[in-house]
Image (cartoon, rainbow, N blue to C red):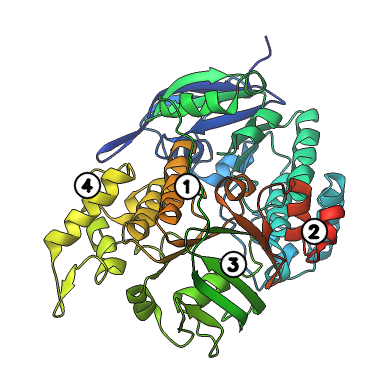
Amino acid sequence: MTEPLLSIRGLTKAYPGVVANDDVSFDILPGEVHALLGENGAGKSTMVKMIYGLVKPDSGEMLIRGGAYAPAEPQAARAAGVAMVFQHFSLFDALTVAENIALGMADPPRMSDLAARIRDVSEQYGLPLDPWRVVGDLSAGERQRVEIIRCLLQNPKLLIMDEPTSVLTPQEVEILFETLKKLKAEGTSILYISHKLEEIRALCDEATILRLGKKVATCTPRDTTAREMAELMVGAELHTPSRDYNEPGAVRLALAGLTVSSPSQFGTSLKGITLEVRAGEVLGLAGVAGNGQDELLGALSGELRAAPGMVVLDGAEIGAKGPGDRRRMGLLTAPEERLGHAAAPDMSLTENAALTAVDRRGIGRNGFLDWAKARGFAREIIARFDVRTPGTENAARSLSGGNLQKFVIGREVMQDPQVLVVNQPTWGVDAAAAAVIRQALLDLAAGGAAVIVISQDLDELMEVSDRFAALNEGRLSDIRPAKGLTVDEIGLMMGGAHDMEVAHA
């Protein structure tokens, strides 16, 4: 038997009102790609934070190659050979690649020497990077390369990856997988977290499955179907979203040459976007992060204003109207950034429910809030979307990312919009919760709403969309029927091949 690289023995971590990890044990072997699976709130994030020294366990122990391992901070974890690529990048846009990497080093070498090492390591692993480029000018895929190379410069024994493909095109995913296979062949172990179960099947040797903080199963992914893994995660049969298809109705939202400057120095301005979305229709918009998705949502929500005639809702010109007016008219949006944009972190769920629903749910009257109605609305959202929380008075930041996402999407869906625009509706959400959210969007469309889904999850877009387009550098590709599109065609559209030649590429 090969000695494990990392042994987890009875790790337990509790917070007020919840046991995040309950007596969890598993091993990761040298050169093994090990998946850590579970629905939102299952305890995955707490587990990897303990391994990386961000959280101290209440009980249990960890061993590296048989020796005691109890990192008090990430620096101690890195010294022991453990590195982590987080789901959300921690990079400074105004600094170069080399400067960002130097900031994470305890004793960085001269910048010219570091730049040479970055070039060598990035090319060695098939992830070429220019160390002198400013991070703000990089694509999402290139930014992820910076995070990965920063880790590889430490020569890690164990690399933890949290949702690493969520911002990549299909072609970039292939490159990443080749890199991970090369690391595996060199003996590096990888702990891999993802909700994309077909990826898990293609890449991982072993999977540990958590449910409500407990380890409930292990499996060999290549011998287990994605559906079987999802059902082990949730402990129940998985619901598959479905809908009745009807002919689309009247145009509910029309954009005519929408051109808007990004308010951010490193943002992407919108350039001449034209589209129509009809009642009963779902329009899917793909794109690698940073290609104008946030600006498009801002232009539709009213946070960014447009010139007259560029945004029309149910026949009414609304380009100059702000978010409140647009909401009252039935155009609702749910942005990608959960904490700070879609929800106020330190406000309770009741307060967050009231934030966007004052008018449409009758929570406000004559300048006063009806807190009983607000609490009732929050309870409805929690019940319908299975939001895991002790109660309506808990702060938004106390929820796991996936549970907060369910709450935010539920809050908008349950206001019966005429048009709903959602950006990344199921990012970081487990399979069961994703199915609930997608079904809610399909039900909205079946009820006569027009729905725009902006997403980097191509499986999601193909599952819910009637028509499909891609954003690249602030421009929109041709809009095509979703049925029959191949992954290669979609990848080319996302990469900027806007004309219809992609259909024959």
Q: Give the mark nearer the N terminus: 2 vs 3.
A: 2
Determine whether the residue tagged by mark 3 lies in a helix, strand or loop: helix
Q: Which mark is residue 438?
A: 1
What residue would you read off at disc 3? 293
Q: Give the mark nearer the N terminus: 3 vs 1.
A: 3
In the rendered image, which quarter contains the N terminus?
A: top right
Disc 2 crowd rating (10 Å Cα; few below 14, some 14-19, many 20+) is some
Question: Residue at 49% of width from left, 19% of height from top?
Answer: 217
Amino acid type, callout 4: Gly
Determine whether the residue tagged by mark 1 lies in a helix, strand or loop: helix
Q: In the rendered image, is residue 6 in sight?
A: no
Determine whether the residue tagged by mark 4 lies in a helix, strand or loop: loop
Q: Are marks 1 and 4 in contact (CB under 8 Å)?
A: no
Q: Nearer the viewer, mark 3 or mark 4?
A: 3
Residue closest to the eye, 196 or 209 = 196
Determine whether the residue tagged by mark 2 lies in a helix, strand or loop: helix
Question: Residue at 59% of width from left, 30% of height from top?
Answer: 35
Residue closest to the eye, 494 or 6 = 494
Disc 4 crowd rating (10 Å Cα; few below 14, some 14-19, many 20+) is some
Q: Which mark is residue 391?
A: 4
Horizontal side of residue 296 vs 408, given as left or right: right
List x then y, in percent, for residue 301: 45, 74
Q: Can you say whether 302 is above or below 179 in the image?
A: below
What residue would you read off at disc 2? 114
Q: Are marks 2 and 3 in contact (CB under 8 Å)?
A: no
Q: Are marks 4 and 2 in contact (CB under 8 Å)?
A: no
Query: How far separated are the C-alphas under marks 1 and 4?
Result: 24 Å
